[in-house]
Image (cartoon, rainbow, N blue to C red):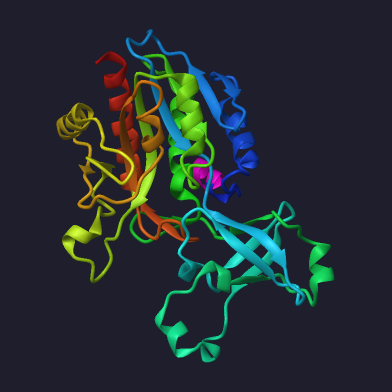
Amino acid sequence: MTLELLKKLCLINGTSGDEGKVRDFIISEISGYCDYTVDPLGSIIAYKKGANRSKNKVMISAHMDEVGMIVTSIKSDGTLTVSAVGGIDARVAIGRQVLVGDNNIAGVIGAKAVHNLSADEKKTAPKFSSLYVDIGTANKEESEKLVSLGDRVHFSSEFLAFGDGYIKGKAIDDRFGCAVMIELIKSELPYDCVFTFVVQEEVGLRGARSAAYSVDPDFALVLEATTAADIPLASAEKRCCELGKGAVVSHMDRSTIYDKELYNISRDEAEKQGIAWQTKTMVAGGNDSGAIHISRGGVRTMAISAPCRYLHSPSCVVKISDLEACEKLAEVMIEKMCTI
């Protein structure tokens, strides 16, 4: 996977329900390499012809949306109140630079000054209801000329390669999966496959639910990023997974118990082909597998995830070697699912 493609994807703004710019970019990349449709919710369903007809209908899926915020009111002093779109810890939002609406109005997320907090407030984590966005205006009237209720608010974050093979940026969850699928679509695949770039994962796996119903696959592979807590003071079992140890293949998370045979095949193939892999040490998180595996009469499903520090923040951190391991293992498992 080229880092330039991932960078372009991550720098596009596209919160849940507002993925249009991401979708347009993906379509510009895959046009001519496959046939595709866009479903009523806005997910892309792409049909890629391979060298051979697949024994099974295999669906590979990644979500286009990212976490963000939505403007809920404009206050008399010109500041904006917001609600989270997806699972964002309010503590990671305070002081962050953001972009508001289609015109990318610059702003900063603020909160009550620490010297004004009560004793009880100092003991509890802040909530989004206590935050606001400062866009540098003096009053409500000025702000209303720039933004509207319902405008999306995105983190403004540089995409940066740093250290020993690490990357930092917003929306790596799940533009990483989208990047892998784009490159697979552009490649010569051994078997026919269906790729779904889905919407609204961060607010309840909604796009995957409708896409899986439409595709009606026998097998599904979800490409994702997953929480890594490999930071100082985290005990071994609480680390969940670790950067630098390869692709993550899970037994279970909060939305899915994964197909055991597919898990075993992925483990055996990874070890046989020298692909670095690991499994989660906690039952945590979830992804579009939760909707896909119970679609229609049931779908045999597995997920391959990139371990990611500081997930759902402006500064997601991943390691390039893990992304490469995910892509290699995905190629292997797609072929296995087509012929099993």
| Residue 106 to residue 31: above or below | below
Image spot of residue 188 (x, y percent):
42, 18
Asked where in the image residue 317 lies, by quadrant, the reply is: bottom left
* 157 versus 11 height, above or below: below
The answer to whether residue 279 is left or right of residue 170 is left
Residue 289 left/right relative to 105: left
Residue 195, how many percent across, how many down? 46, 25
**In front: 317, or 41?**
41
Judged left or right of residue 99, residue 287 is left
Magenta stretch encompasses residue 125: no
Q: Which quarter of the figure is the N terminus placed in?
A: top left
Residue 181 appears at what percent x and percent y? 45, 31
* Residue positioned 28% across, 66% down in the render: 231
Q: Magenta: predominant secondary structure element?
A: helix
Q: Residue at x 36, y 61 (%)?
A: 163
Q: Residue at x 63, y 71 (%)?
A: 132
Q: Quadrant of residue 162?
A: bottom left
**Residue 221 visible (yes or no):** yes
* Highlighted magenta segment, given as a residue range: 4-9
Q: Where residue 326 sits: x, y (%)? A: 32, 38
**Quick check: is 8 in the magenta stretch?**
yes
Number of marks in the rendered image: 0
Is 263 above or below relative to 118?
Answer: above
Residue 182 showing in the rendered view: no
Q: Quadrant of the C terminus?
A: top left
Where is residue 279, by image quadrant?
A: top left
